[in-house]
Image (tube, rainbow, N blue to C red):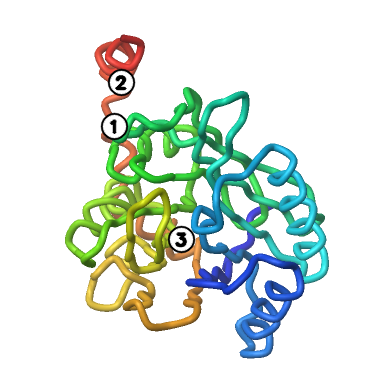
Amino acid sequence: MVQKKVTAAVINRVNSFEPHVLTEVLSEIVNARNVPDLVVLPSLVGHGILSPGAAEQRLHELGALARSFSVYLSVHGWLEDDHKLRSRGWLVNPGGKLCLFQDQTHDRSGRLAVGSDLRVTETSIGKVGFLLGDDVFVPEVGRILRLKGANLFIAYSFLSVPPNPWRQWAGVWQQVQQNQVFAVESGFKGEAGGRKFSGESIIHGPCELTAGETGFLIRDKLTEPHVVAELDYVKLQQVIAGYPLHRYYNKELYQTALRQCYLR
C-alpha cells in the first residue's frame, strides 16, 4: 500500500561510498528531523566503472544501510558486464533487498549498451521507474513508464559544464509536467569519462502542487549537501482529478505508429 505522504531526499555529493561515510551522511539527514522514506544517492560514475562483482558488493552494503535506516536507497553507476558498458540504476528496499534495476535505454554517445525494457515496481513510496542519462530528454520514456503505472520517477541526469538550468529543465521537468507524477532528480556533479558535469538536484512535482507553480518542490542551486521534500499523493490525485491529462492519451497511436518506430 502506498503511503499518503512520502519524504524524499537527494544527497548531492559524498567523499566516499564506504559504508561508514554513508552512515554519517544518512545520520545527518535523520538528525535534522527530516526522516526520509527514500534517499537518492549520487551516481557512482565519478568513482570509476563497476565490475559485476563490485556492483554486487555495493548493493550488499547498501542493503545493510537500507535495513539500518528503514529506508529505500537508490544509486546509479556504470557497469561493465560481458565486455559491454551499461548505465544502470538500482533501488534497494528497507528490507535490504533489490526491488528494481534499470538500464539506460537511449545514448547519444554510442558508448553504452542500452536496455530495451522499461520497468516499474510497486512500493510503499509509490510506483517507481528510472530515468537515466539521455533518457530524461526522451518524452517516450516517461510516457511509457506512466502507462505502466509509475507515479514516481527516480532520475539521474548528466549536464555538461558550464551549468545550464534551461537545458536541465528540458529534461526531468518536462517529463513530470506531461505525465503528472513526482520525480526525484540527482544532477551529477564532478568528472567522469573525461567530461565535467554540473547539474542541480531537484525534487519535482506538477506545477499545480508547487509554490509559484514552478514545478519545483525544492532545488539545491548547487550549494546544498542534500535536499528534502514531501511528496503528497493525496494532493497529486487532486491535481489529476482536476485535470485528467491521462484520459487524453492517444493510446491507439502509441500501439500502432510509435510501436513500429521503436521496433525499427
Say whether residue 72 is visible.
yes
- Left or right, 55 with respect to 128, comes to right
Residue on which the image places disc 1: 249
Instruction: Tell me: residue 185, above or below residue 135.
Output: below
The amino acid type of the residue labelled 2 equals: Tyr
Residue 241 seen in this snapshot? no
Q: Quadrant of residue 14?
A: bottom right
Q: Kindly state the secondary structure of the residue where label 2 is placed.
A: helix
Residue 54 lies left or right of residue 87; in this view the side is right
> Picture coordinates of residue 134 (x, y %)?
33, 42
In the figure, 214 relative to 186: above or below? below
Please state the horizontal and vertical placement of residue 12, each as a whole percent of the image. 48, 72
Which residue is tagged 2?
Answer: 254
- Mark 1–mark 3 Cα distance, whole angstroms, equals 24 Å
Residue highlighted by disc 3: 184
Identify the residue shown where x is 53% and y is 27%: 84
* Label 3 Cα neighbours within 10 Å, binned few <14 / some 14-19 / many ≥20: many
> Dot 1 lies on which element?
loop
Question: Residue 137: horizontal and vertical position, in percent?
Answer: 28, 43
Three-letter amino acid code of the residue under disc 3: Val
Mark 1–mark 3 CB contact (< 8 Å): no
Q: Residue at x 25, y 63 (%)?
A: 161
Question: Is 21 placed left or right of 109 in the picture?
Answer: right
Residue at image location 51% in from the left, 35% down from the top: 86
Q: Which mark is residue 220?
A: none
The reply to whether callout 1 and callout 2 are in contact (CB within 8 Å) is yes
**Dot 3 and dot 2 residues touching (CB under 8 Å):** no
